[in-house]
Amino acid sequence: MRRCELIRVLGGIVVGLRPHRLLVVAIAVFALLPIEVSDAGWLPDLFKSSSKHPKAPKRAKSAKPARLARHRAPSKQRATRLAALGPVALPPSASKPAAAKCDPSALRIVLDVGHTAESEGAISARNVAEFAFNLRLARLIEEKLKADGFAETRLLLTEGKARPSLFKRVAAANDLHADLLLSIHHDSVPNKMLEDWEFEGKKRHFSDRFSGYSVFVSRNNPDFKTSLLFAELVAREMKAEGLQYAEQYSQPIMGPDQHPLLNKDTGVYSYDKLIVLRRTAMPAVLLEAGSIINRDEELKMDSPERRNAISSGVASAVKEFCEPRWALLGPL
């Protein structure tokens, strides 16, 4: 039985039901329906079926990521549940095709490895360059995304000094016609906050004052709305992994490194002038995975367990970005 045929059956069932029973039926049916039925506006049709003068529902416009393709077919279990309801006549309003969804095999994600071998970024409390942390984590994220079917994932390695390399990576991402960019970094603190300590017989610098991940977007990105959507998904997955976000960026003590906190629950900040976020032609997000200048957190960031947690969280965020309602309901 085709999905949309169910609408007329439901309309007949709910006629004459009391309001509170009608709500219970609607909720129960929603649990049985495949995702595509909600796209066709079945819930408004269901409630309007008992009206004397029903009106055709308007299709809502929804934001979709670039490079959309058809949604995967419903699972066998979903189809079995629908088939059990039996055949009915197909209403004319149900003949419209379901909205297209993201195709994981076609979605092109660029994983930008922050900094370069010539300009290595921050130096950890134990004298390890940030670039080494970034590259190792980005490769693991790439591996997980490809294993999840995102075959078009690209690892972006850039050469050169700091500022010129920023424009190079933006140009490379744009040339790849990417649908989404995620820049991978590890955090430090302004130099004025650094303290001295001795490690392996040599003087090093550290700051145990702050820790945690943070996620940045630019309100000047050409697709800020989608950038923010993906940033929220990444941040929520980090939080779901039991991680805490770095709160210092909203504090005046950070001086010029202070940034507006867009979501105090998840740790999403705006960094409007950052080149890699505002100059890219696609939605772009920057993830500071954790603080490597914090001596305790550096050890955690160097552990397979923490890298696995972060990379798994990013992979889950990408899957939800691609198929949001499937991620919400989960398998039936």
Image: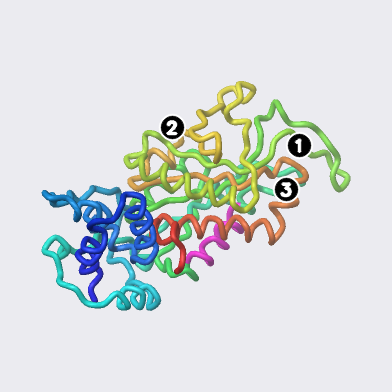
**Residue in the picture at 64% in, 47% down:** 243
Earlier residue among tags 2 and 3: 2
Q: Residues within 10 Å of mark 3 (few under 14, many from 20)?
A: many
- Which sits in the foreground, 241 or 219? 241
At mark 3, the secondary structure is helix
Q: Chief secondary structure of the magenta span?
A: helix
**Residue 272, label in figure:** 2
User: What colouring style does the render use?
Assistant: rainbow
Image quadrant of residue 35?
bottom left
**Residue in the picture at 64% in, 58% down:** 307
Q: Amino acid at mark 1?
A: Asp
At mark 1, the secondary structure is loop
Residue 79: image location, x then y, percent: 33, 75
For the C terminus, the image quarter is bottom left
**Residue 298, label in figure:** 3
- Which sits in the foreground, 123 or 318? 318
Image quadrant of residue 91?
bottom left
Between the residue at mark 1 and the residue at mark 2, the CA separation in whole angstroms equals 27 Å
Image quadrant of residue 204?
top right
Q: Is residue 216 above or below residue 180?
A: above
Between the residue at mark 1 and the residue at mark 3, the CA separation in whole angstroms equals 10 Å
Residue 76: image location, x then y, percent: 38, 78
Was residue 135 drawn as part of the magenta stretch in this picture?
yes
Q: Amino acid at mark 3?
A: Glu
Q: Amino acid at mark 2?
A: Asp
Q: Which residue is mark 1?
A: 208
